[in-house]
C-alpha cells in the first residue's frame, strides 16, 4: 500500500521533472489521485505516461496562455492553448464559480484542451462555495451512432454535484456508455449483446472487436432497448462541449494517445469541456436546499430494495465510501500502473516508485 500523501509528493515531483510548474504539477496530480481514490483507475495513474508521451509529441503545451475569448456576466469561453486537461478544466470551473458568485449562475465553454480525467473532481469544486457544479467533456470517438457502423462519439462523461447537509454530497458522475473501454476488457466473456458491435455494425460479444474496427454502443444499446436515448445523451454532451466553445466535435476529437494520429483537417481546436456553477441561494436559502437534498437521499435510500441486493444505490455513495477508505488505508497500484510510472521515471532519471 502507498499512502496518498506519498503518491501526491512523488507524482508532483515527477510532473515538475517533466516540465510543469509546481502549482500545475499539484493540480494534475490531484486530478489523477482523485480518479484512483474513487475507484476509477482507468483515468488514474495510467495517465502519467499518456500525458508524458503527449508532451513529448508536442501535443500538450506546458506553458499555455489560457485566455477568455468571449464573456458576459454569466458566461465565458476559455481558450486553453493545448494545456494539460486538468489545468484547463480547473480554470474553466473556477471561472464558472466566479461568474456564479455575482450573477447567480456561471457557464464556461472550453476549447483547445486535452483529456481532463474524472469529471467529478471539477463539479465538486462548486460544492465548496455552496453551489451546484456541472462538468462535462467530449472525448475521442469510440461509440457508434444508432444504426451506424463507424465511431462517431466519445464516452462523453458528465457530472453534477449537489451539496448535502448531513449526508455525503450527492454526486452524479457517469459516462454515456454502459462501460469504459478499460472495464470492458476486464468483464467476463462473452459480453452481453448491445454493448459492442463489429466493424460491420453487427452485434459482438468480445471487447477485442474494438481493436479490429468495432465500436461501443451508447447506453441502452440498440433502438429496441432505448439506445437512441443513450445516443441523445452522448450527443448533447458533445454539442455542449464543442459547439459553444469551438472545440472539435464527434469523430474529430483528438485521441489521448501520442501514438495515434490526429486529423489533418480538424473542425475545431482540441478537446472541449463545458462547466456550470449554480449558486444555491439564487433559488432558495442554502440551508433549505441542503436539507432537501438530505431528504431526497433518505427517501430513496429507505425505499424497499430487491432481495439479494444491497438496496438502493445513491449516486456517489459508493465512491465516497471507497475514497474515505483509501485516504486512510492508502492505494495499491496494479503492476501495470507501477510499470507505467517507472517507465516515465527512468526516462527522466527520476527515482523509481515501489509498493
Image: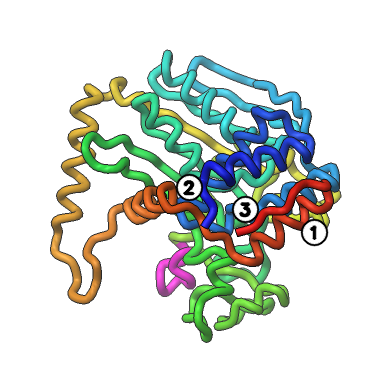
Give the residue pinned by disc 2: 158
The Cα–Cα distance between marks 3 and 2, rounded to whole angstroms, is 21 Å
Label 1 residue SS: loop
Question: Tag 3: Cα neighbours inside 10 Å, few (<14), some, or many (≥20)?
Answer: many
In the image, what residue occupies the spot 80% across and 59% down?
260
The magenta-colored residue range is: 219-228
Instruction: Give the distance between the C-alpha atoms of the residues marked 1 and 2, in whole angstroms.
Output: 25 Å
Quarter of the view holding residue 354: bottom right
Q: Nearer the viewer, mark 3 or mark 2?
A: 3
In which quadrant of the rendered view does residue 261 lie?
bottom right
Mark 3–mark 2 contact, CB under 8 Å? no
Colour convention? rainbow
* First in residue order: circle 1 vs circle 2: 2
What is the x, y in percent for residue 189?
Answer: 52, 84
Identify the residue position indicated by label 3 in the image.
Answer: 45
Residue 197 is covered by the magenta coloring: no
> Circle 1 is placed at which residue position?
260
263 or 45, which lies in front? Answer: 45
Residue closest to the eye, 339 or 62: 339
Q: Nearer the viewer, residue 198 or 122?
A: 122
Q: Is residue 334 left or right of residue 255?
A: left
Disc 1 versus disc 3: nearer the observer: 3
- Percent across and percent down for residue 55 are 80, 44
Q: Is residue 216 above or below residue 174?
A: below
Q: Is residue 227 magenta?
A: yes
At horizontal 31% and vertical 21% (from top left) the residue drawn is 282
Amino acid at each position: 500500500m502507498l499512502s496518498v500523501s506519498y503518491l501526491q509528493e512523488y507524482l508532483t515531483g515527477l510532473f515538475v521533472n517533466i516540465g510543469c510548474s509546481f502549482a500545475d504539477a499539484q493540480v494534475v496530480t490531484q486530478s489523477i489521485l482523485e480518479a484512483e481514490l474513487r475507484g476509477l483507475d482507468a483515468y488514474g495513474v495510467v495517465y502519467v505516461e499518456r500525458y508524458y508521451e503527449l508532451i513529448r509529441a508536442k501535443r500538450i503545451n506546458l506553458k499555455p496562455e489560457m485566455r477568455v475569448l468571449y464573456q458576459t456576466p454569466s458566461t465565458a469561453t476559455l481558450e486553453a492553448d493545448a494545456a494539460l486537461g486538468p489545468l484547463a478544466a480547473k480554470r474553466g470551473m473556477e471561472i464558472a464559480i466566479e461568474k456564479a458568485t455575482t450573477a447567480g449562475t456561471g457557464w464556461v465553454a472550453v476549447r483547445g484542451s486535452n483529456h481532463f480525467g474524472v469529471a467529478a473532481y471539477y463539479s465538486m469544486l462548486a460544492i465548496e462555495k455552496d453551489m451546484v457544479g456541472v462538468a462535462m467533456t467530449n472525448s475521442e470517438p469510440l461509440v457508434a451512432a444508432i444504426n451506424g457502423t463507424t465511431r462517431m462519439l466519445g464516452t462523453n462523461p458528465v457530472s453534477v454535484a449537489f451539496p448535502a447537509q448531513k449526508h455525503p454530497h450527492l454526486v452524479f458522475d457517469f459516462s454515456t456508455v454502459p462501460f469504459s473501454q478499460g472495464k470492458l476488457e476486464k468483464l467476463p466473456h462473452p459480453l452481453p449483446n448491445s454493448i459492442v458491435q463489429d466493424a460491420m455494425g453487427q452485434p459482438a460479444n468480445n471487447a477485442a472487436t474494438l481493436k479490429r474496427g468495432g465500436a461501443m454502443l451508447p447506453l441502452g444499446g440498440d433502438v429496441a432497448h432505448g439506445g437512441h436515448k443513450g445516443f441523445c445523451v452522448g450527443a448533447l454532451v458533445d454539442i455542449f462541449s464543442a459547439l459553444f466553445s469551438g472545440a472539435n466535435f464527434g469523430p474529430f476529437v483528438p485521441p489521448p494517445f501520442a501514438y495515434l494520429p490526429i486529423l489533418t483537417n480538424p473542425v475545431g481546436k482540441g478537446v472541449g469541456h463545458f462547466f456550470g456553477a449554480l449558486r444555491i441561494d439564487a433559488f432558495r436559502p442554502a440551508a433549505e436546499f441542503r436539507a432537501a437534498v438530505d431528504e431526497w437521499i433518505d427517501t430513496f435510500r429507505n425505499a424497499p430494495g430487491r432481495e439479494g441486493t444491497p438496496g438502493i444505490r445513491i449516486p456517489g455513495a459508493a465512491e465516497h465510501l471507497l475514497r474515505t477508505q483509501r485516504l486512510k488505508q492508502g492505494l495499491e497500484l496494479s503492476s501495470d500502473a507501477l510499470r507505467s510510472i517507472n517507465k516515465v521515471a527512468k526516462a527522466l532519471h527520476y527515482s523509481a516508485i515501489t509498493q
